[in-house]
């Protein structure tokens, strides 16, 4: 099980990346062991398979069915947290390298889908950043100046193809892109297997151990895979308790898709400057219609349980821009990991030589995952990468201390919830389809009653470091606000860093 077992289904989810993959059935050996089979994990596996390395990929669910299946698949080289802020925090050279590395990731996706013949709807488009109100005009000018300082291909324009924005200012960024993420992963999986790689689905990794001459990846079934190197690409790392988790925070994000007449909106990527912000893109459909995807309305994981309000806000926002939308087709949520200094953690896991990590996507998981594949390939096979320091997982950014303290206050506040009353007095008051935290003596219980009356009672303590989980009524799962673990109603871990289930009671 993984996040594909949560309740909502994305526009992409019907495409299976590797339907013939099987669980690990016997001990195995590889040069490079990859844990996680999303865009990051499969991109890493592809690069090493292309270099003649023996590769094994392990995922707790179906291949390609994790957070990559819950993206909106923008391929952008523009800093999601704004170049002006990245320059202020880490300097121009870091910002320039960020833009160059993210651009290289898009170039790599383009090259792979061409060379491997992957029909994934890849296309180059312009990206547009625009203020939703006049109060944001100064921020737009500041972002234009920052982009020009570091060599970004950008220009200021007037007018967007949306109602009420025909005379609005905007920044246009060239050579952005988009694609169908699951069709692309299906192509990567096929290419990896054709080069001798092995893909193991429905296999839960419990431990990643390093020895002087290699690594051992142990699974819940008692089987293991040994190798020379391990790469943990699990959205939120399963192999680390503190070093990286204190430098990033999990956020729930929401997305919807609507039918739209082909040609009604020019193909492109569109981002506004509200907080929380919104974004729009198109996906080719069949016949005379396409899909318009809108996303945003993010909040800290576990901090709110108001998905219907979030979807209503997205709908109202996009209908303000495009009043003549067709029918809604899908709505779903996902999770992004926001790094305190706006750049991912890609490279050697702190304290390890042979274990690497990919996390901290900062809302740009597609390109961060591909950057990681190039960076880690070069670190292992060449010994260096020009982007190593930019994404170094052990880095400390002193200018981000305020964000560090704010994000880590969540864990401190969370543990205080153990002495608070329950959300309902008794499990007897739970209605069918309802989940809630209940106090039973000194114990906090995560309780859910299914429609058939079955009652699930599990400990409310996350098995990562013991934070207090919160109910997510949209996805019908338990979310950990501290570091982003998700659990099914029966306690099964669906998303890292937790690997063990909530304790039975």
Image (cartoon, rainbow, N blue to C red):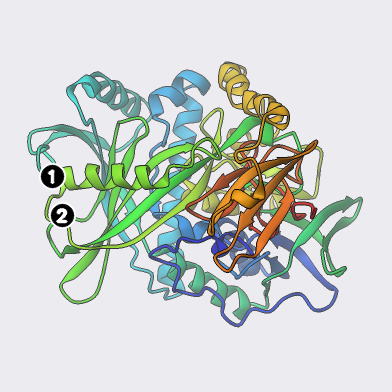
* Residue 400 occupies quadrant: top right
Q: Which residue is found at the position 62% from the left and 17% from the top?
A: 398
Residue found at the far left of this picture: 167
Q: Left or right? Give the position of 213 relative to 139.
A: right
Q: Which residue is found at the position 66% from the left and 60% from the top?
A: 455
Q: Separation of disc 1 and disc 2 at Cα? A: 8 Å
Q: Which residue is found at the position 59% from the left and 26% from the top?
A: 407
Which badge, 1 or 2, comes first in the chain's sequence?
1
Indicate whether 87 appears above or below 199. Answer: above
Q: Left or right? Give the position of 171 relative to 404.
A: left
Number of residues whose C-alpha sits closer than 10 Å to that of mark 2, classed few (under 14), some (14–19) or many (20 or more): some
Number of residues whose C-alpha sits closer than 10 Å to that of mark 1, classed few (under 14), some (14–19) or many (20 or more): some
Label 2 residue SS: loop
Q: Nearer the viewer, residue 343 or 313?
A: 313
The residue singled out by tag 2 in the image is: 265
Q: Left or right? Give the position of 28 relative to 262.
A: right
Q: What percent of the width, then of the height, locates residue 435?
A: 58, 51
Q: Which mark is residue 275?
A: none
Q: What percent of the width, then of the height, locates residue 95?
A: 46, 30
Q: Nearer the viewer, residue 323 or 85?
A: 323
Indicate whether 135 appears above or below 35. Answer: above
Q: Which mark is residue 162?
A: 1
Task: Classify the position of the N terminus by image quarter.
Answer: bottom right
Q: What percent of the width, then of the height, locates residue 345?
A: 62, 39
Q: What percent of the width, then of the height, locates residue 408?
A: 64, 26
Residue 460 in view, yes or no: no
Q: Which residue is found at the position 21% from the left and 22% from the top?
A: 137
Indicate whether 419 appears above or below 476. Answer: above
Q: Nearer the viewer, residue 238 or 231?
A: 238
* Tag 1 and tag 2, C-beta contact below 8 Å: yes
Indicate whether 407 appears above or below 376. Answer: above
Residue 99 in view, yes or no: yes
């Amino acid at each position: 099980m993984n996040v594909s077992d949560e309740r909502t289904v994305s526009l992409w989810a019907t495409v299976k990346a590797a339907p013939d993959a099987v669980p690990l059935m016997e001990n195995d050996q590889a040069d490079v062991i990859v844990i996680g089979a999303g865009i990051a994990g499969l991109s890493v596996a592809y690069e090493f398979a292309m270099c003649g390395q023996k590769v094994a990929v392990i995922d707790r669910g179906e291949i390609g069915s994790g957070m990559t299946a819950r993206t909106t698949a923008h391929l952008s080289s523009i800093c999601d947290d704004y170049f002006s802020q990245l320059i202020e925090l880490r300097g121009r050279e870091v910002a320039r390298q960020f833009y160059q590395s993210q651009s290289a990731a898009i170039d790599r996706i383009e090259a792979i889908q061409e060379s491997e013949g992957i029909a994934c709807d890849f296309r180059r488009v312009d990206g547009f950043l625009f203020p939703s109100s006049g109060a944001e005009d100064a921020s737009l000018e500041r972002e234009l100046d920052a982009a020009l300082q570091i060599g970004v291909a950008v220009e200021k324009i007037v007018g967007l193809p949306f109602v009420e924005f025909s005379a609005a200012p905007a920044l246009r960024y060239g050579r952005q892109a988009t694609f169908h993420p699951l069709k692309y992963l299906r192509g990567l999986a096929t290419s990896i297997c054709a080069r001798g790689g092995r893909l193991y689905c429905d296999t839960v990794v419990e431990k990643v151990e390093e020895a002087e001459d290699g690594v051992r990846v142990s699974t819940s079934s008692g089987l293991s895979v040994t190798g020379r190197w391990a790469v943990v690409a699990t959205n939120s790392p399963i192999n680390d308790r503190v070093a990286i988790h204190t430098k990033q925070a999990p956020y729930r994000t929401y997305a919807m898709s609507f039918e739209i007449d082909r040609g009604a909106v020019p193909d492109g990527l569109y981002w506004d400057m509200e907080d929380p912000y919104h974004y729009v893109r198109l996906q080719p459909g069949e016949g005379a219609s396409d899909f318009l995807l809108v996303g945003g309305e993010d909040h800290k994981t576990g901090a709110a349980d108001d998905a219907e309000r979030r979807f209503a806000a997205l709908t109202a926002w996009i209908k303000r821009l495009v009043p003549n939308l067709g029918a809604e087709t899908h709505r779903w949520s996902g999770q992004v990991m926001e790094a305190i200094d706006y750049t991912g953690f890609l490279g050697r896991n702190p304290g390890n030589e042979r274990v690497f990590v990919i996390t901290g996507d900062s809302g740009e998981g597609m390109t961060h995952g591909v950057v990681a594949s190039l960076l880690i390939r070069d670190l292992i096979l060449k010994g260096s990468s020009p982007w190593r320091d930019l994404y170094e997982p052990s880095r400390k950014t002193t200018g981000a201390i305020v964000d560090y303290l704010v994000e880590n206050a969540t864990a401190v506040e969370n543990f205080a919830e153990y002495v608070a009353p329950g959300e309902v007095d008794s499990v007897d008051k739970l209605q069918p389809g309802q989940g809630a935290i209940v106090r039973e003596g000194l114990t906090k219980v995560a309780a859910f009653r299914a429609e058939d009356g079955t009652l699930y009672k599990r400990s409310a303590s996350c098995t990562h470091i013991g934070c207090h989980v919160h109910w997510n009524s949209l996805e019908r799962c338990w979310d950990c606000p501290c570091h982003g673990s998700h659990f099914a109603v029966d306690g099964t871990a669906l998303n890292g860093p937790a690997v063990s289930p909530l304790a039975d009671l």
